[in-house]
Image: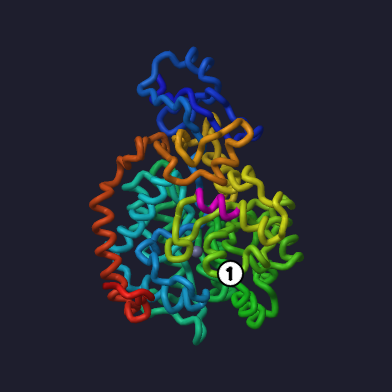
Amino acid sequence: MAELLIKGGIVITADKDRRIIKNGSVVIDDDKIVSVGKTEEISKKFTSVGEVIDASGKIIMPGLIDTHIHHTQMLARGIADDVDLVTWIHDRILPYEAALDNDSTYLSAMLACLEMIKTGTTTAIDPGGYRMENVAKALSDSGMRGLISWASMDAFTERRTIPKEIYTTTDEAIKANEKLIQEFHRSLNDRIRVRAGIRIETNASDRLVKEINELAKKYNTGVEMHAAVAREQVEFVREKTGLPVVKWLNSLNVLGPHWLLIHMGWIDDEEVEIIKNKDVRIAHVPGASMKGAYGSGRFGKFPELISKGVTVGLGCDSSAANNSIDMFRAMWQVAALHKEVRYDPALISPEEAFEMATINAAKAVQWENQIGSIEVGKKADLIILNINRSNWIPVHDFSIIPNIVYSGDGHDIETVIIDGRIVMRNRKVLTINEDELLNKAQKAAEKVIDKSGLLDKLKSKWAIV
Ligand SMILES: [Zn+2]
């Protein structure tokens, strides 16, 4: 007897044929999808199930996969708005991160999990911060699926310093990565994965890049790294190595499909070819780029990368960068940004944006054999949308995916299932005490920001009376 039948909905499978099944049903047993098809046929096959969810008039779709999010930066929402990237990292975020302790890191991660579950994200790809065992605990407690890393840095200059609390040598960074991998990679029924992490190219030595890559290969996992985020990063690396970022990485003989490079708004045509030939995966983060003026839209090659078949996943970035982690906003952003900048209304279709948030996001971290689509044998990570809402009507067969991308939002999500478990039902999150968490997170954020010494820089522009 199967455990759960979701019946009578519009099933967006994101399978190979990109089928959308009207009056469709999905059957889940344990953590897996065991059947997908027309309700009529499924009802005959599965006459007895543990629980039935009626999805009539609703959409059943794969849970969204955010290819770039920072669990540990949730308490930093609002502390780094409207500043350039070097200021953002070194004057705001690193002092904030240095002020985190285990409790505040956990609360930050739980807040991320809560926002993601409430807006339909079922897998989070986090290139890391520190105290990441608290993030693993939050993923465990909330029921989320996630990939985490430890963000290594071992090279520093005067303008790119790092607080002593999170300073490491190359050896210490490698050791911290290995420990995280050993402890959590493929844990909790493979709900948590760990990759080796390099924070950003401007704080990484050649040796760190090579050894992190070796570590990833040793544990059959991948590498996460922010790269070519903004012009100054690329210029910095060119000054140091004589090469732009991708060519520098390529010269170290490390690149391959196990690499996820994040942001990547500043690459040249030859680097596009290297990425294509090496099958390197990319995380595109349009919201952070637009808000932080990174230049991904104006100078990036994302339409070219996508048209050449490079795997590009979509990400929100942290709530200190974007500042929302609702993937529906990210889908809208990516489908709109390139149209405006290139003066071409056909660039990045809603279907492409949807793929970037589901099946291509899974491919971006080599997880597509388990997640990213609704197919038999895959993990049961899916979401149910209530579309009988003012932002959805009218909806036609031709506008189901466009409505999701152009007019949908995270609050359309009614029910969320991760690894076969219902974690949100009718908008009530079952794994988190929401009121208690919000209250604790607010207090923890106030404490951390106070401790970070940033309060002097953070004054309301308008009088608070
Ligand atoms: Zn990031």
Residue 253 seen from this side = no
Q: Vertically, is 13 above or below 247?
A: above
Which one is nearer the viewer's eye here, 411 or 17? 411
Mark 1 C-beta to ligand 1 under 8 Å: no
Measured from the top left, where is residue 201 in percent x and y? 57, 72
Locate residue 422: give its quadrant: top left
Q: Nearer the viewer, residue 87 or 162?
A: 87
Image coordinates for residue 180, horizontal then vertical, percent: 41, 59
Query: Where's the N terminus, which quadrant?
Result: top left
At which x and y percent is residue 190? 44, 44
Identity of the residue drawn at 63% across and 77% down: 237
Q: In the rendered image, is residue 386 in sight?
A: yes
Q: Quadrant of residue 375?
A: top right
Q: Quadrant of the C terminus?
A: bottom left
- Identified at 40% across, 52% down, the residue is 184
Residue at position x 52%, y 31% in the image: 377
Asked whether 289 or 64 is in front, the reply is 289
Is 198 left or right of 416, judged from the image as shown? right
Q: Identity of the amino acid at label 1?
A: Tyr
User: Is residue 231 placed above or below 115 in the rendered structure?
Assistant: below
Would you say residue 93 sits in the magenta stretch? no
Circle 1 residues within 10 Å: few <14, some 14–19, many ≥20: many
Q: Which residues are magenta?
A: 328-334
The residue shown at (70%, 69%) is 247
Please give left or right for residue 65 compared with residue 462 in the image.
Answer: right
Residue that badge 1 annotates: 294
